[in-house]
Image (spheres, helix red, strand yellow):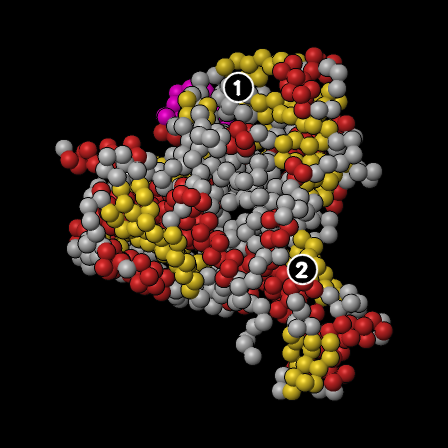
Amino acid sequence: MSDYALIGKRMPRIDSRTKVMGKAKFTADLKLPGMLVGKVKRSPYAHARIIRIDTSKAEALDGVKSVVTGKDTQGVKWGVFAYTRDQQFIQTEKVRYIGDEVAGVAAVDEETAQKALDLIEVEYDILPGVFEPMEAMASATELIHEDFANNINVHVNIDTGQVDENFKKAHYTREDTYVSSEESYFQAEPYAIVARFDHEECLEIWCPNGGPHMKSKPLSNSFKIPLHKVKVRKIAIGGAFGGRSEICPVDYICALLAKKTNLPVKIQFTREENTIATRQGHSMITTHKTGVDKHGHVLARETTCYMDGGAYSSTGPIATSVPFLSMEQAYRMGAVRYNGYRVYTNKPIRGMIRTHGRCFAAGLDTQLDMIAEHLGIDPVEMRLRNSRQPGEYTSTKSLVGSCAMDETIHKAVDKSGWKNKFGKLPAFHGIGIGTNSVQTGFPMGIRGGSQSFIKFNEDGEATVMSGVVDNGQGNDNMLVQIAAEVLGLLPEDIHLVSADTETTSSDPGSYSQVSTFVGGQAVQIAAKNCRKKLFDVASKILKVAPDTLDARNRMIFVKEDPEKCVSIKKVVRISLINFNSVNAEGGYWPKVDMKREWISNPSGQMCEAFSFGTTIIEVKVDPQTGQVEVLNATACQDVGKALNPLVLEGQFEGSVAMGGQGGMLTESHEWKEGRCLNSTMLDYKVPLACDMPEINNIIVESIEPKGPFGAKEAGMSIAMSAAQAYAGAVSNAIGVYMDSFPLTPDKILAAIKGKRK
């Protein structure tokens, strides 16, 4: 027999059939009796004081059931941390970007709700706006937030010491600056919310989210009601990519309208609203200064990054830190200094994103290629000489346990045919490599752990309860697969209750790449505790010691004599006859340094595991048009243990699409005085299936000893390493190292023409 019946096996996801057949219910599909249509009144100005709001005409319109403004709120401000609470859910004094919320309406239909918005009169005192981080820092106009000098929202400083001394020792040093524009998540499912207050004055809400428990707490705070009275319900979710982890003002507005009308309310975003009124990826200006010895080993690195944070803090301290952390995890550095500045501008709010820091990461790897060329070292060898090794500490004192970075590099190189291609391809053909690392979790205080509960039913099937949410990446399947493996059941025997704050315990959510490592581990522990109870009963039936038993295919059997067995159903029924129910709980909290903090103390164990990935891309560039044709992609990641290779390959391919094909070739926003000019899918170029290259997926298993069955984060390292590899491949093809991303045809043509001159 193999070690596992289900773990490591390629199996279709448990939700595949319902989604393919269109049976899955998303928030926009919900219809509740008496439900009203909600709409949000948004600011047409990027920066302005609110002088007066008159809602009387809207309230008098037939069919309008409620109009709410900031005066109807409790005045609570939102921020991920206490020191970043700067955003009202409905503005009362000042608007700070085009799209800022100033009022909400609920009406009997959409047409009436839209008419009501037009009847709300808002008088503004227009203020000068600032739209670029460097401009905002130097602006002499009114600050966007009065308490933040120079419009600097967050400053993260990390300095390991000896940086200046190591630069003096360096054989070769270079300094380069890279820029990238904003990007959007563009989830397939536009944002929608349904809210109602029940007969006990409890708030029920359905919405796309990265973690229901991360939504319920701020809603509890904003309405000043007990946490148990906020019930975030399970619903199918069409993608997140980091963009649905926080509370959104419209969640509160929808709930407030439901409270005022005592009826259910649904607010459904237009595609434009989905772009400007949720979150976006930060634009960045990043300068890397790197000093190496004559063999290419990095002795010192100094990085300064300016990030356009938009109008409010959002996940500011985290977003400002993660690009640096990914760099320090992936590469060894003798000494490093980082200054990250997240700057307020009068543009939509920026948050965490799957491809966060594309100019940071792609710039770093581009610079490594430049240094390698100067020293006469192959880019692959350059990375191997600086790659992270197991058992080492990062610059900020996190121990790296399992690490197969080198193996991902070697396997990607072999599969892609790098040695036969690099430096040997025809004109305007190129090949590039990128390597990256992502943390599996980070300190989240009391919300950092997950709990699970499992109970057996009398028919021998089991119900698993977990707070883990599935945003489309397959978390529901992961939980079922783990539980079924441990309990000896089939996946169809598991009934999953997940992502509902009323019935499931706390969980950090699909955030910081921790669902499998923490949430999956909680389910595994609960299942082991449940199995122990089953084995105790079965051992009496079979007259053997419990430690001689195993379970598979709905049977409990003696390991040395599988014919000696009893069905799990029978064991459960015998337990119930003896007045003992078969259930158990399990919980897991990652072992991290709870004193570590993003700004005040960015040092100590950040998480228990790190993933490592390598991507190699081969391209052909048309020198007449600047168009890039991607010939093939090789994506290789150390995932610890592949619980379901079929699902992981889908994650790899999605990462190449978002981080590389879209993120580095087509996706960016255009602006005019703070107004987004390409907010819809017609103008914002998300790659389609027909745009994607052939992708070779390679899974490397390092077996993380602290993860469930050895698993850790899977997929995110490919997203950023793909961005790096795309940059390297295009640069290699045209013979010019690119420094502005995405790599659009106009930039490529300009680089080619510049080289010819």
Foreground pick, 382 / 689: 689
On the question of residue 111 being in view, the answer is yes
Residue on which disc 2 sits: 452
Q: Quadrant of residue 670?
A: top left
Q: Is residue 138 magenta?
A: yes
The mark that comes first in sequence, 2 or 1, is 1
Left or right position of 710 against 113: left
Secondary structure under badge 2?
Answer: strand
The residue at 74%/14% (across/down) is 60
Query: Crowding at label 1, few (<14), some or many (≥20) Cα neighbours within 10 Å?
Result: some
The magenta stretch is: 135-149
Spot occupied by residue 180 in the image (x, y as percentages of width and height): 36, 37
The residue at 49%/48% (across/down) is 597
Report the amino acid beneath label 1. Pro
Q: Is residue 441 magenta?
A: no
Spot occupied by residue 726 in the image (x, y as percentages of width and height): 33, 46
Secondary structure under badge 1?
Answer: loop
Report the amino acid beneath label 2. Ser
Compared with 341, 546 (above or below) is below
Residue on which disc 1 sits: 44
Spot occupied by residue 692 in the image (x, y as percentages of width and height): 40, 46
Look at the magenta stretch and give its main secondary structure. loop
Q: Which numbered tag is attached to residue 153? A: none
The residue at 73%/36% (across/down) is 31
Compared with 121, 34 (above or below) is below
The residue at 49%/30% (across/down) is 680
Spot occupied by residue 654 in the image (x, y as percentages of width and height): 46, 49
Foreground pick, 333 / 457: 457
On the question of residue 80 being in view, the answer is no
* Image quarter (top left, top right, bottom left or bottom right) of the C terminus: top left
